[in-house]
Amino acid sequence: MKIINIKKKTIFKISGVILFVMIVGIFTNSFSMQHYYNVGFTTGLVTATTLNVRSGPGTNYGIVKTVKKGEYIRVFAGVGNWYIVQVEGDYVGAVSQQYVKAIYPNSSGSSSNNSSSASRK
């Protein structure tokens, strides 16, 4: 009787481990880690009439805020075809890259050249 109980406990433990490994495998494939990358700028200009800021990088994520055309947003990083951004009200989320124009800062030398050439025109 004791041997049967030990075998049942062992089988139960092995079954539990197998089930755990299967669940981890399913979630790892379904919610795979997405890699962030540096975009080279920190300010973006919204080009869409209304742009949805989502809770994650994809249309399957919920909308946390919307921004209007012509608004500036802070861009932290890229994930696939999405930017991770901060918008007015300190909302952080993801927006599609196709609706954001990168605003690159001018170097100190080029901004002074632009202002002097503009004053000559």
Image (tube, rainbow, N blue to C red):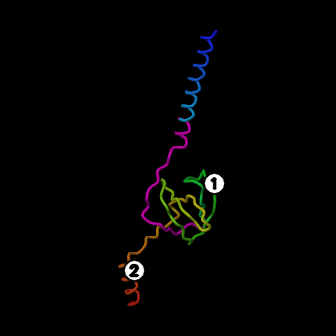
Tell whether position 31 is magenta. Answer: yes
Residue at the far top in the pictured view: 1
Q: Position of residue 106 (x, y in %)?
A: 41, 75
| Disc 1 target residue | 62
Hey, what amino acid is under mark 2?
Ser
66 to 108, vertically: above or below: above
| Disc 1: CA contacts within 10 A as few (<14), some (14-19) or many (>=20) | some
Q: Quadrant of residue 4?
A: top right
In the image, what residue occupies the spot 60% across and 57% down? 54
Residue drawn at 58 percent across, 66 percent down: 87
Q: Are marks 1 and 2 in contact (CB under 8 Å)?
A: no
Q: Amino acid at mark 1?
A: Gly
Q: Label 2, on which residue?
A: 111
Local crowd size for mark 2, using a 10 Å CA cut-off: few (<14), some (14–19), many (≥20): few
Q: Earlier in the sequence, mark 1 or mark 2?
A: 1
Going by the picture, which residue comes out furthest to the front? 2
> Rounded to the nearest whole Å, what is the CA distance between mark 1 and mark 2?
40 Å
Magenta segment main secondary structure: loop
Tell me which residue sits at (60%, 50%) in the image. 60
The picture places residue 89, in percent across and down from the top left corner, at 62, 67
Q: Position of residue 16 (x, y in %)?
A: 59, 26
Say if the magenta span includes residue 12: no
Q: Residue furthest bottom?
A: 120
Kindly state the secondary structure of the residue where label 2 is placed. Answer: helix
Element at label 1 = loop
- What range is drawn magenta here? 25-49
**In the rendered image, which quarter is residue 120 located in?**
bottom left
The quarter of the image holding the C terminus is bottom left
Residue 36 horizontal/vertical position (percent): 47, 54
